[in-house]
Every structure is written in structure tokens, then in C-alpha cells.
Image (cartoon, grey):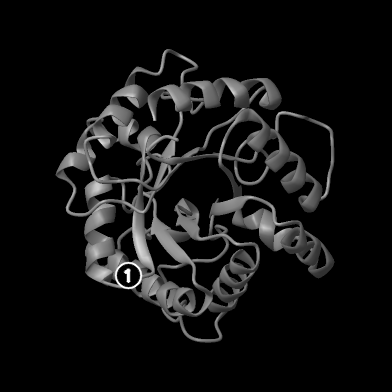
Amino acid sequence: MGRYRLGCSIPGASFMPEGEAGIKRSALELLSDGCEAIIGAGFDYAETGVGMVMSMTEAEMGKAAAAGLPIETANSFIPPEYKIVADGACEVGSPLYKYVDTALSRAAALGIKIVVFGSGGARRIPDGMAKETGRAYIAKFLSMCADIGDRCGVTVAIEPLRASECNAINLTSTAAELSGGVGRERISYIADAFHMYHGGEPADALLRASALPVHIHVSEPPDRTYPGRHGGEYVAAFAEALGRTAYRGRVSVECGFSDFRREVRLAYDFMNAHF
């Protein structure tokens, strides 16, 4: 057994292309089929998008929970129509509060332990607002998530995003600092090798981080294909540096696939060799 639990995100469950154009399936079917292919390729668990969880009916939720699908993490937390950097956004009973409460409760019902907070559209700082002011709103949102996460048993992990996707929290060090500033057990951050690459961060940036992340995402830069697609040099260097830290958690492939069932096996081969 390797040092980490290796996982893969289910295509079609977040922003990523499904790779099976024209086929319309229910959320439960997508999750079930995705888990089957991911576990069949050798991975330990699957990751999904929160939107997929939210789109299921109550009956589908019951079936998914009863099936014990091996989904341990989720991404794409907040849809862009919910604005975090706004007055009153995080008040108890607000639309954003109700969404987060439902999303984390549903995640917990499926056995999901970590929800990744990227959500660039939702957390974007409006033009003209000071970055420090915007980050204070985001910190308030995270405190709200911590309150709900304490009750549900789900950790929310801040994801640094490349600057082209969001104008807030672009570096691993920034995410680690924000997580530490919130100071809540259910708030942490993730390291994403793809965003690190595009942010100009060295592959060994985690060796200088103030605290280790709670989760890892990897994909092949520069085009977010499966790791190893173009040789995997940066991801391999990231894996080597990660191995020099005390991190022993989950590492998820989060990428686009053009031929999911073939490429998920290639992704696992690379991950198994390097992680």
C-alpha cells in the first residue's frame, strides 16, 4: 500500500467534460458508473462535484447512501450565482447559508469527508473593493462553513485558483494563511498541482508552507489532462516533494478526459508509480 489514498474525480460531476457527449444520464447513474470505473482502474476512492450531489432527488440520495458508493471527497462547492463577497451573504437563513447547510448535510449522508472550496465565480472580489476587505468576507463565509461542518462532520478545504479563474486566493501560501487565520478545525486548504504550475509556484512549495493541506488535487499542466499525458514532469516533481513532507492523506486526479474509461487507467498507472 502506498503512502496516500489515491482517488479520481468522476467526469461530468463538476466543470469537467463528460467524455460521452450526447448521453444523458441521471446523477445517480453518473455517480455509480463513475465509481465503478474509478475503483476498477485501481483507485481507492472517487471524488464528485457538489452540484451532482445537489441535483439528486431524495429517492436517489437514499439509494446512493444505501449503496455505499466510495465517494470520499467533493469539489465545485458554491455555484457562481451565490455571491460570497456581499453584505448579509452569510447570515443564518440567507440563500447562501441554506445552500451550504443542505450541501454539507447531503455530503455527510453520502460519507463525503472533505468538500473543496474553489468556486471562483462565487468568491470573486468585486472591482474596486480592497483585497483585504474581500478576504474578510471570504473568512466570514468560511466561519459559517465551519459552524455547519462541525455539525455535519465535513471539512471545507480552500482551493487556490489560478488568476485567470479568480482574483482571490491564487497561491498555496495564501490559502494556508487564510485557513490558519480562520482557526477552525473544519477549515483547511488543498494544494492543487495544476494551479500551482500556473501560479508560478515551484513543485516543492509545500515544503515551505506554514501548515500542510488536508487534500491534494493533481492534473497535467498546462491543459488539465490526466497526469502523465505529456510526460508528467511537474506532477512527478510535486509527488517527490510531497513525499518529503508528513502528508499522508488523499490525492485526487481532477482533470478532463477525452476517453474516460481508457484514460482513467493510464492516470492510475502514473499515480501508482509516483505517489
Looking at this view, name the residue that lies furthest to the top. Answer: 231
Q: Is residue 238 above or below residue 125?
A: above
What element does badge 1 sit on? helix
In the image, taking residue 113 as reference, residue 67 lies left or right, namely right
Q: Could you tell me residue 247's position as x and y percent?
A: 30, 46
Numbered disc total: 1
Q: Is residue 100 above or below residue 271?
A: below
Query: Between 24 and 246, which is closer to the camera in this rendering?
Result: 246
Amino acid marked by disc 1: Ala
Q: Quadrant of residue 243?
A: top left
- Residue 256 in view, yes or no: yes
Q: Residue at x 34, y 17 (%)?
A: 233
Q: Could you tell me residue 172's position as x and y percent?
A: 27, 46
In the image, taking residue 63 as reference, residue 122 lies left or right, namely left
Q: Is residue 126 above or below residue 36?
A: below
Q: Is residue 34 above or below residue 26?
A: above
Question: Which quadrant of the rendered structure holds the N terminus?
Answer: top left
Q: Residue at x 70, y 25 (%)?
A: 261
Q: Could you tell me residue 46's position as x and y percent?
A: 60, 44
- Residue 131 in view, yes or no: no
Q: Please give the residue where the numbered disc 1 appears in the rendered image.
A: 139
Q: Could you tell me residue 207's position as x and y percent?
A: 18, 40
Q: Residue at x 84, y 67 (%)?
A: 59
Question: Which quadrant of the rendered structure holds the C terminus?
Answer: top left
Neighbour tally class for label 1: few under 14, some 14-19, many 20 plus, Cα within 10 Å? some
Q: Residue at x 22, y 30 (%)?
A: 202
